[in-house]
Amino acid sequence: MRTGVSPRAVAGFVVVALLALVVLGARVVLARTAARPQPLAPATSTVKLAASGTPLASTSAPASGATVASVVLVHVVGQVRHPGVVRLAAGARVQDAVKAAGGATGRADLAAVNLARPVVDGEQVVVPRPGEAPPPGTSAVVPTASSRPGSPTGAGASGPLDLNAATPEQLDALPGIGPVLAGRIVDFRSQHGRFASVDELGDVSGIGDAVLERLRPLVRV
């Protein structure tokens, strides 16, 4: 009687062991594959369509940027308390420039300055003393009739301006007059007749001694 294991039995055992190893290995591989994170599919965005098939406009309003207020720089010199460059809001007047420079001094001749004129960026405003001629290139002082184009009868062009023949436009061109006083001079002339002397300008409402003295060399009767 044989007690050893036959070769056929050994071969069968080996085959069974190999199959077991193959099955075990396959399970390990499947387990590792299942444990790996799968990449997410890219999200698809949908756009709402109007009834016509066109995309709907966004209802959120775009944020508007802050508006920077524009400013102008003006050089104020002459009879002011703090001459120098002042910063003003766009649309400011000459009177704002004078005020920003500390205001006029007691020796300022404000009748020679058009305080109501709007200033422009980069200009120079000169506040003179009585009888002081402004330097060329400045624009704060009201120009005389001779310095305005189209004023043929202004002082210095063909002599002093004739008060009894001057038009409102010619009177407006005189220093310290302006359109309001020019109208008053014409009304005074219409109501009282011809001017007999330059001194009668002092009877016109709004013309003081300082303005009258400034006008003497520029007008005649």
Image (spheres, grey):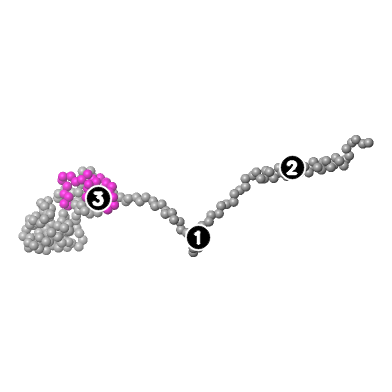
For image coordinates 51% across by 57% down, the residue present is 47
* Foreground label between 1 and 3: 1
Q: Position of residue 160 (x, y in %)?
A: 12, 59
Q: CA distance from mark 1 to mark 3?
A: 61 Å
Relative side of 139 to 64, left or right: left
How packed is label 3: few (under 14 Cα within 10 Å), some, or many (20 or more)?
many
Q: Which residue is mark 3?
A: 124
Q: Position of residue 215 (x, y in %)?
A: 12, 55
Is residue 199 visible in this depiction of the protein?
Answer: yes
Q: 182 or 61: nearer the eye?
A: 61
**Residue extent of the magenta highlight:** 84-112
How packed is label 2: few (under 14 Cα within 10 Å), some, or many (20 or more)?
few
Q: Position of residue 206 (x, y in %)?
A: 12, 54
Relative side of 102 to 19, left or right: left
Q: Quadrant of residue 16?
A: top right
| Residue positioned most to the left | 196
Q: Earlier in the sequence, mark 1 or mark 2?
A: 2
Q: Which residue is mark 1?
A: 49
Q: Amino acid at mark 3?
A: Gln
Q: Amino acid at mark 2?
A: Leu
Judging from the image, what secondary structure is the residue with disc 1 in?
A: loop
Judging from the image, what secondary structure is the residue with disc 3 in?
A: strand
Q: Which mark is residue 24?
A: 2
| Residue positioned most to the right | 1
Relative side of 143 to 122, left or right: left
Total label count?
Answer: 3
Judging from the image, what secondary structure is the residue with disc 2 in?
A: helix
Q: Amino acid at mark 1?
A: Leu
For image coordinates 94% across by 36% down, the residue present is 1
Q: 27 or 191: nearer the eye?
A: 27
Q: Quadrant of residue 103?
A: top left
